[in-house]
């Protein structure tokens, strides 16, 4: 098997666990607060990854002003999309956001 297969298998397992944990969380936390916790955890994970790159001597990240602004606009659009689904459960809002990201 090719090397990417194991990455794909790992991603499939993590995505499945994501769905299980989202369903469990939806019954125990409100949509807005749950979404904030999910996004804050994701941001912290990315920050740790970037710190490991920076302090590990393998920094390969680049940015330009337009790239940063497009990323900010993407974040605003993402929040707007999720706010439109406040009446839905956390699990359905995240699922809808996932499928919208695939389409766009």
Image (cartoon, rainbow, N blue to C red):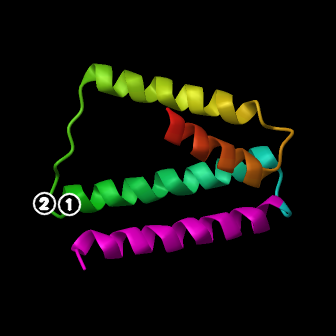
Numbered tag placed on residue 65 in the rendering:
none
66 vs 38, left or right, is: left
Expressed as whole percent of the image width and height from the top left, the position of residue 13 reads: 52, 74
92 vs 49, left or right, is: right
Expressed as whole percent of the image width and height from the top left, the position of residue 63 reads: 24, 32
Q: Quadrant of residue 9?
A: bottom left
Residue 43 in the image: above or below residue 2: above
Q: How far apart in space, not on screen, are marks 1 and 2 (Cα)?
A: 5 Å
Q: Say which residue appears at 47% left-offset and 55% top-offset.
A: 44
Segment tinted magenta in the rendering: 1-26
- Give the residue pinned by disc 2: 57
96 magenta-colored: no
Q: Callout 1 environment at 10 Å: few (<14), some (14 to 19), or many (20+)?
A: few
What SS does tag 2 mark? Answer: loop
Expressed as whole percent of the image width and height from the top left, the position of residue 76 reads: 56, 26
20 vs 49, left or right, is: right
Expressed as whole percent of the image width and height from the top left, the position of residue 2 reads: 22, 74
Residue sticking out furthest to the left: 57
Say which of 42 and 99 sits in front: 99
């Amino acid at each position: 098997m090719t090397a990417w297969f194991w990455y794909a298998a790992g991603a499939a397992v993590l995505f499945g666990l994501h769905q299980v944990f989202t369903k469990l969380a939806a019954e125990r936390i409100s949509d807005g607060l749950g979404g904030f916790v999910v996004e804050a955890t994701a941001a912290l994970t990315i920050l740790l990854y970037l710190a490991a790159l920076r302090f590990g001597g393998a920094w390969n990240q680049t940015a330009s002003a337009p790239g940063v602004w497009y990323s900010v606009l993407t974040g605003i659009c993402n929040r707007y999309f999720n706010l439109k689904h406040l009446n839905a459960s956390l699990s359905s809002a995240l699922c809808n956001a996932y499928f919208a990201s695939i389409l766009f």
